[in-house]
Image (spheres, rainbow, N blue to C red):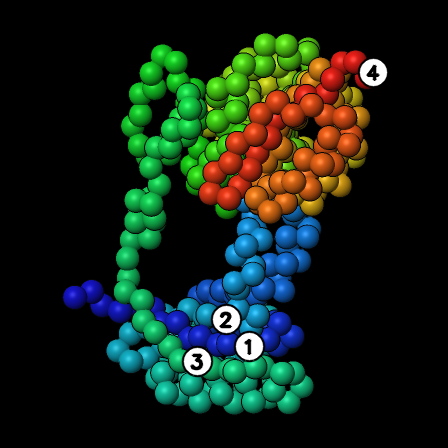
Amino acid sequence: MQDIQSIIFQIRSTHEAAFAIENYFIASGASGVTTIDKAEFVQTLQEQASPDLIIEDFLDNLDPEVIIEAYFPYRNDQIQIYREFNLMEKIAQDIEKDWITIKEFEKMLGESLDRIAEFLNIGQGYLGYKFIEEQDWAENWKKFYNTLTIGKIVINPSWIDYHPKSDEILLNLDPGSAFGTGEHASTALVLKYLSDYKFADLPEGPILDLGTGSGVLAIAASKIFEGREIVAVDIDTHSVNVAIENAKHNAVHNVIFRTGELSDLEGKYSLILANLIAKLHINLADDYFTKLLPGGYIIISGIIEKYVREVKAKFAQKGFALILESSENDWSALIYQKQTRGS
C-alpha cells in the first residue's frame, strides 16, 4: 500500500468569506488551494462568454455555497505548516515549515475561522479532512486523453505516435490550461463543419477565429484553407499565448494571434468562426454582418438548445441565410451566409 503523502482540509463557506479563508490557508503554508465559487463562475461567464470555459447548465446545479479545499504535505499523522502567518516575512527570510499533528492544526484552523466569523458570515465552516495517495500525476493525467477524430480532422496528443492517412488533417494539440481541445461538443461541431462542408464559393479574404482559446479552430482552418490569412482573437492574454505555442507545434505560419474583441478589428472576412455563448451571438449579430464580406460565411457555435430559436430569429432578422444546422449533446452550431444581393 502506498504511503499517504497529502491531506486535504475542506471548508464550506460563503462568497464573502472565501477570500479570507483562502488567504489563511496560503499563509499557513498550503501547497495548493482550490475554490468552487458559483458567484465567481457567473462573473467569469459574463466576462469570458465562452462555452468551453463555463457551461450554463452546470451553474444551475452548482452549490450556492463556496467549497474550499487546502492541500498540505502529510506524514506519520502530521502535516507541514508555517506556525506564524506573516507571509511576506517567510518569503524574505526563507522560514522553514514545522510538522504538527492534524489535531493541532484543526484547533488552529477553528480559532482562525472564529476570528473571521466575527466580521464575515463563514457559512457552515469546517467539514473535515481526507487523504490523497501519492501518484505520478505528471504522467497519469495523460491516460484521460486519446487521439480524437472529427471528420477528416485528427487531434493527437504529442505523447501518442500517430501516422495520419493521406486525407486526414493532423493537429498536434496537447491539453493545456486554455480551453478548446476539441472534446467539447461546441468545438467539435465547428471542426466537423470545417472538415466536411465545401466552401466552394467562399470569397477571397482572411478568416477570423473569434474567441480562439487554445487556437484549435484557427490551426485547423490554416491547414484546410492553405494560403489564407487567419486572424485569431481572444480577450484573454493567457489563452492567446497558449494558442501561439500550439501553432508553433503545428508548424503553422499563416495565423495572426492577438488579444482583443471583434470591435477592435479592421477589415472584413470571408469566414468567421465564433464558438461563443448564445447571448453574445445575439449581441454581435450586427457586427458579424458588418465584418463579413458579401457572400461570406459565419459558423456560430456554443448555443444551448433552449436558445437556438432566439439566435435564429435574430440572424434571420438581420438578413443572414441559414445554410446548415447541427446539434450534439444539447449544443447547436449553425452556418450562415451573408447574401451578395443588397450587400
Seen in the picture, residue 100 relative to 211 is either above or below; the reply is below
The amino acid type of the residue labelled 2 equals Ile
| Snapshot quadrant of residue 202 | top right
Pointer 2: residues within 10 angstroms few (<14), some, or many (20+)?
many
- Quote the CA–CA distance across marks 3 and 4: 64 Å
Determine the secondary structure under disc 4: loop
Q: Earlier in the sequence, mark 3 or mark 2?
A: 2
Could you say which is closer to the camera, residue 337 or residue 246?
A: 337
- Label located before the other in sequence (3 or 1): 1
What is the C-alpha distance between the residues marked 1 and 4?
Answer: 58 Å
| Residue located 49% across and 64% down the image | 34
Where in the figure is residue 15, as x and y percent of width and height?
Answer: 62, 72
Residue 297's quadrant in the figure? top right
Q: Which mark is residue 13?
A: 1
Q: Which residue is mark 2?
A: 68
Secondary structure beneath disc 3? strand
Q: Nearer the viewer, residue 81 or 170?
A: 170
Rendered image: mark on residue 342: 4
Q: Is residue 38 left or right of residue 292?
A: left
